[in-house]
Image: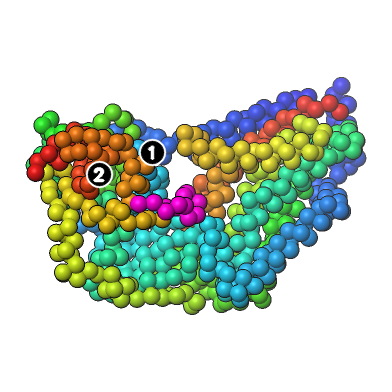
Amino acid sequence: MTTAVVDRAVQRPTATRAPLGRLLRSELRLVLRRPRTLVVLGLLALVPVVAGVGIAIAADSGALGAEGPNGGGMASLVEGNGLLLPVFSLVIAMTMLLPLVGAMLSADALAGEAANGTLRGLLVAPVGRARLLAVKAFGVAAVTLLAVLLMTVTGTVAGVVLLGGDGMLTISGTTLPFGAGLGRVLLFAALVTFQVWALAAVALAVSAMTEHPLVVVAVALGLVIVSGVLNAIPALDWLTPALITTSWGDLPDVISDPMPTGNLVEGVLRGGCYLVIGYSLALSRMLTRDG
Amino acid sequence: MNRKRTALSAAAAGTTAGVVGLVLIAAPAGADTTPPALPETTAESLVASVLTTDVPALSGTVAVSSDLGLPIPGLPTGDEAARIYTDGEGKARVSLIEGDGEKTLVADGATTWLWSSADKSVVKYTGGARDKAGEEQRLTDPAAAAREFVTAMGDESTLSVDGTARVADRPVYQLVVTPKPSERTLLREVRISVDSETRVPLRLEVLANGSAAPALSLGFTEFTPGAQDASLFTFTPPAGAKVTDGNAEVGKHEPTEQQKQDLLNAIKPKVVGSGWDTVYVGTVPADLLESEVTTEDKGGREGGKTTGLDLVKQFGQPVSGAFGTGTVITTKVGTALVTDDGQVAVGAVPQQVLVDALGQK
């Protein structure tokens, strides 16, 4: 008995445990090799360019002056203010596209593998369940970050080229130098990424519980939509601070000057709670799942 | 197997921690409900200290929430919040978030700038016209609002200190202004929360009869006294913004003395009663009642055209009495009565008081 334990302990590192770096790299390669991932990343990268071209054309024809119910707001500020374009695009994408991407990646990570029948192989493979989940979660998080960064880069480039402007005109009417403006853009991208991670974590928990990827996407988007509806009901105001989407609307605080940090910090805490809940549920399901 | 159990309990603990975290975030700010221990004070000395204190340099967030029982155009309905910075010496900055835009008011002592991000416009006021722009600022200044109120209501009210509480995470005295029993008013009491340290009123709440929640609440949700960065109180209109001179605008719309006199003669304003049951009676010029106004629905789309009187009737209930027939609009904090021949009576009083006031010719 004792010998057996010792034997296993000795053998384990050499025979069965693959280096973590290699696992993560192979997972990333797996995700990025899926055609739909590439299509989605490409489309997301195009969003800021399309928005930039649209705003540039609208500005030329003077259409932005006549603000509609939602048309005014940030769009009119983006004109001649290129550094705001990535922020504007991310705000648009945060309403549906980015949550969809997070949900889709999470759906593919576990439920998709289960549907293909490949998850069974992974579960019986000599990789710990927690380790497997960590690798999957890393894949989702890394590609989400990649998607947001892609949008940020194309947005910044398209903004500076198409709309121009030196520095960043904040929503408060002050002008930040280019470096500080770029800092705000990166901060915004980081906060957006974190919020998508939080939703993706919840989606990953669902993904561990089903073998139908569509269910995962439906539940995650359902969560977003139901949160929005609950948010709109005045009688449920007490619930608002606990809803996952509550902090999404506060994200544009980043382009206020001086930047009010209260809501942003609270948003990170709220997202963190969902992140922990999501990963914990996913872990407990993975551990109890049959091989 | 043992490792699995450890991991499972870690997962359970993680889930619990996340849920607890969400509950903590959702719990109302200042969940610490035990009233702070502060030295005793009398209502009189509290009022005196409020009236004499100078607003220090501070930064904070002011929130307005109202539940008046009727959406009245022009009043802030629902919740609004503004960020405020002041150096305590007349320079101030107020930021009001509106949808995905922001309105910023910067007063640098000589010039007041009003920036609106929605249409990238700047309005500039210099010198005396500053007060006009300051009206928006005054709306969001709990200190000034509370002071004006105490001055106006002093004689007809009972002042008392109702213990201590926490507002914006600071210990406050609760100054309660209650109407004397002889006052016939819809209001139950007005609560003013006075910061124990700076003696700045941090919150003003108006409570109406028959409801526990305040009908109107105006107060700081964050309050940090301390020196502010001087750059906050300067403003340079950004390139590409359209700048208009507010002084010229004000001058254009300023009515002449003759016009003012004509308007006063037409309205025949009269004040009936005093204190809490003050009723303002006047006559609306007939052409104003008959004039067509264009109504807007919630989405901002243009609705049908209607006359002013029809609009009033739409909101209110028909009523008749010694004065003839008219329409009464009732809210939690006040009542307005418009007769069909154009007389108007308004006050924070029940309907009967308005009818009596209209009877006093």
The region drawn magenta spans B295-307
Where residue B340 is drawn, which disc sits there? 2
Q: What secondary structure prevails in the magenta region?
A: strand
Q: Residue drawn at (59%, 35%), measured in percent from left and top?
A: B18
Q: Is residue B305 magenta?
A: yes
In the rendering, at what x and y percent does residue A114 appear? 85, 35
Where residue B119 is drawn, which disc sits there? none
Q: How is the image coloured?
A: rainbow
Q: Is residue B302 magenta?
A: yes
Q: Residue drawn at (38%, 38%), measured in percent from left and top?
A: B30
| Chain identifier of the residue bearing label 1 in the image | B
Q: Residue drawn at (33%, 42%), measured in percent from left and top?
A: B313
Residue corresponding to mark 1: B30
Who comes first in sequence, dot 2 or dot 1? 1
| Of the two numbered discs 2 and 1 in the rendering, the one whose residue sits closer to the viewer | 2
Q: Given contact means CB atoms under 8 Å apart, are the residues at marks 2 and 1 in contact?
A: no
| Image quadrant in which the C terminus of chain A is located | top right
